[in-house]
Amino acid sequence: MQEKACSWYIWVRQAVREVNQSGGNSLSAVVSLVNSMIDQAILWRVSDLHLEPMRDGMRVRYRRDGLLQEDVRKLPKEIEAAVISRLKVMAGMDIVQRQRPQDGHIRYERDGKKWLDIRVASMPVTNGEMMVLRFMNLEDEMLKVAELGFSKRNQQKFETLIHRPAGMLVICGPMNSGKTTSLYAAMNALNVSEAKLITLEDPVERDLAGVNQVQINPKVGLDYVTGLRAVLRQDAEKVLLGEIRDSQTAEMAVRIALTGHLLMTTLHTEDAPSVIFRLLEMGIKPYLLAATLSGIVAQRLVRCVCPACRCSHVVEEGSCEAALLGDSYEPGMVLWHGRGCIHCGGTGYYGRMALHEVLVMDDCLRQAVLQQCERQEFSHIAVEHGMESLWQDGILKVKAGFTTLAEVRRVLYGS
């Protein structure tokens, strides 16, 4: 990949020049352009590449370390269709169909070496078709639980939850917050020859050796509810359910946990206590929820301080940072930040880690569920019984030099 280290702008300019000279009909030039975009995405550790048609050309944006960044150059209007068609061919999609969304995937190889799996999704918009490419490196090793960024205390809680013989564990957070990564790490820890593990996923993100993975396919009648019913007849001890999307799925998930299985799943909520109230809104009876729910993990991903340009600074008394630290502030406290360098693209950040909020259900919390107490009261009880909030976990990681206060605040509060 060293030869790819030149700026992507040069690659695009060269390829576009060839396309323009051939009147947009040069297949080799389009192939060169698309490959250069993918190669640069690999080099920049991009998780998503967005191609969005605008009136004056196709906007190119990439997501790196969780943030979307726009390329200063747009692809010329006259080659948009050729670029989209080339990607559709690579992804096994219908190049003729432009009026409905499509999904596909690319197993991208370079010089005979398999680099990654690329999930491709297209959608018609006013000015043409937009497309998103999601990159998944198949050569990356599966993370272990110890590598998920848990504090020592939260890791002990999480490991206790995943090794319970039965119950329901919910991992919550917004999209792209690492929920699936945490679930896969848990399944990897449970993957022994004496246990039968089954996953129900849409889509199956990665192959887990020794685990029975089921791809959900509603077109043939295999949805989450149907899959969960079938799991009851498969003599499985541990079940991974990709996501609870509706009341029927929630009901079946609770039933699975009630019959002596460990079920791990995800839900889109802002924090751990919110999971309780979301499941109640879905129609789960309080007594069933209290009986089956064993724990909840909320998580967010924050950018890490770049190790190549990190430097320290003293937090001044009365500063904004001191105010954010609150009771955690001490005079003379030293924190870390990145100055910005070539290694991190001038951002001061490189890579991401997770913030966690781990709630372990106990008798007091179960009683609070049965009494259907208010959300604020439930959160207060959870904190009293040992739950550290996402903000508290973020402060710990700021003090340890992993990330910055500004980054934790941005991710949790949007400013």
Image: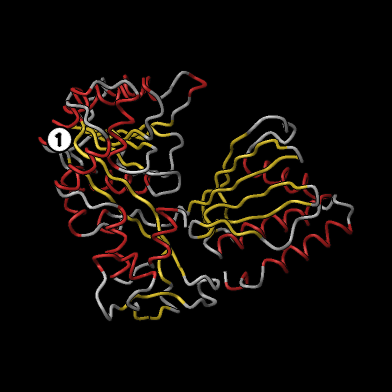
Q: Position of residue 72 (x, y in %)?
A: 70, 63
| Picture quarter with the N terminus | bottom right
Compare residues 293 and 313 and report the one nearer the observer.
313
Q: Does residue 28 lie above or below 280 as drawn?
A: below
Q: Which of the two residues, 234 or 262, is positioned nearer the viewer here? A: 262
Q: Viewer-proximal residue, 214 or 110? A: 214
Q: Position of residue 266 (x, y in %)?
A: 35, 37
Q: Quadrant of residue 211?
A: top left
As drawn, 141 above or below 274 = below
* Residue nearest the viewer, comparing 122 with 234: 122
Q: Residue drawn 52% across and 49% down? A: 117
Q: Which residue is rendered at x = 13% and y = 30% of the image? A: 367
Count of marks, rendered view: 1
Q: Amino acid at mark 1?
A: Pro
Residue 229 visible from this viewpoint = yes
**At x 60% / y 40%, what residue is drawn?**
121
Answer left or right for 333 relative to 117. Answer: left
In this picture, residue 207 sits left or right of residue 334: right
Location of residue 377 by image quarter: top left
**Farthest residue in the front direction?**
318
Q: How is the structure coloured here? A: secondary structure
Outermost residue, left direction? 363
Residue 193 location in percent, x, y? 20, 41
Mark 1 packing: few (<14 Cα in 10 Å), some, or many (20+)?
A: few
Give the x, y percent position of residue 53. 73, 46
- Secondary structure, mark 1, is loop
List the residue tagged with mark 1. Answer: 165
Q: Is residue 405 left or right of residue 392?
A: right
Q: Is residue 237 visible to the viewer in this orientation of the structure?
A: no
Left-right relation of 89 to 211: right
Q: Is residue 370 above or below residue 357?
A: above
Splitting the image into 4 quarters, where does residue 250 fall?
A: top left
